[in-house]
Amino acid sequence: MSHFKSAEEAAAAGKYVRTVRSFVKREGRLTKGQAAAIERLWPSIGLTLEKGLLDLTAVFGRKAPVTLEIGFGMGHSLVEMAANAPERDFIGIEVHEPGVGTCLMAVEEAGVDNLRVFHEDAVEVLKHCISDESLNCVQIFFPDPWHKKRHHKRRIVQPEFVQLLTQKIESGGIIHLATDWENYAEHMLEVLSSAANLSNLSSSGSYVPRPDSRPKTKFERRGEGKGHGVWDLQFQIK
């Protein structure tokens, strides 16, 4: 067991401490289309940790409410949301490169210009690139449920992570989560309800109906056809 209180403290002492990650990188082979989209669009749409703390007004060339999505998968619903809300700006974070490539292909096809993308670990992006109280909304849809009990510690929605999120969201801003695993939904509800600076937007103190702003994915529609449930949560920064 390390005697360091944090990874940052260990790093300052020249030591490396392994941290628990909420994802496993499964880098599939890029298709030609994905690779070509990244080559064409990354210079104008891609964001990197090396740029440090972002000036979001400069990034988008305007001042507008910003939605950050963590783990956008192939990006189809994120691009649809950006297309449907041109008055907002969007940032997507995804660790899997084929998903980034597919998202950029969809960006090009839809012709949206209010979306930027990170191919990075979301925790590192939040810590090093996003200013406090700069976001209007953070959304995490269908994160890896890590359904085995011994893996629950890998779930991204944990008290420390929610505390980090709330630092980055402005007063009145929203955290929007969705999952198709009831046990994870219960865990999310418990974690967010325990945060002192969050207020549940559900009138029943539990879950909310799927907002029209969140498009249904093919996976979600297929699951509903089999009788699977989906749970949405929306909490507001006090």
Image: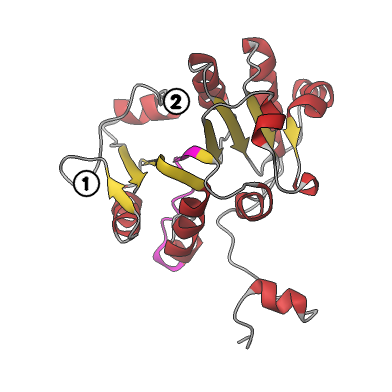
**Secondary structure state at the residue bearing disc 1:** loop
Residue 196 place in picture, x, y as percent: 32, 60
At 33% from the left and 52% from the top, the residue drawn is 198
At 51% from the left and 61% from the top, the residue drawn is 154
Crowd class of label 1 (few under 14; some 14 to 19; many from 20; radius 10 Å): some
16 relative to 73 in the view: left or right:
right
Q: Nearer the viewer, residue 182 or 138?
A: 138
Residues shaded magenta: 136-150
Residue 213 place in picture, x, y as percent: 39, 23
Quarter of the image that includes the N terminus: bottom right
**Secondary structure state at the residue bearing disc 2:** loop
**Res. 217 mark:** 2
Image vertical order of residue 132 relative to residue 116, above or below: below
Residue type, numbered disc 1: Ser
Residue 96 place in picture, x, y as percent: 67, 41
- Residue found at the very far left of the displayed protein: 204
Q: Nearer the viewer, residue 168 or 229?
A: 168
Instruction: Report if residue 149 lies within the magenta region.
Output: yes
Image vertical order of residue 34 relative to residue 96, above or below: above
Residue type, numbered disc 2: Thr
Residue with the mark numbered 1: 206
24 relative to 138 in the view: left or right:
right
Q: Nearer the viewer, residue 80 or 162?
A: 162
195 relative to 107 in the view: left or right:
left
At 49% from the left and 18% from the top, the residue drawn is 85
Residue 132 place in picture, x, y as percent: 56, 50
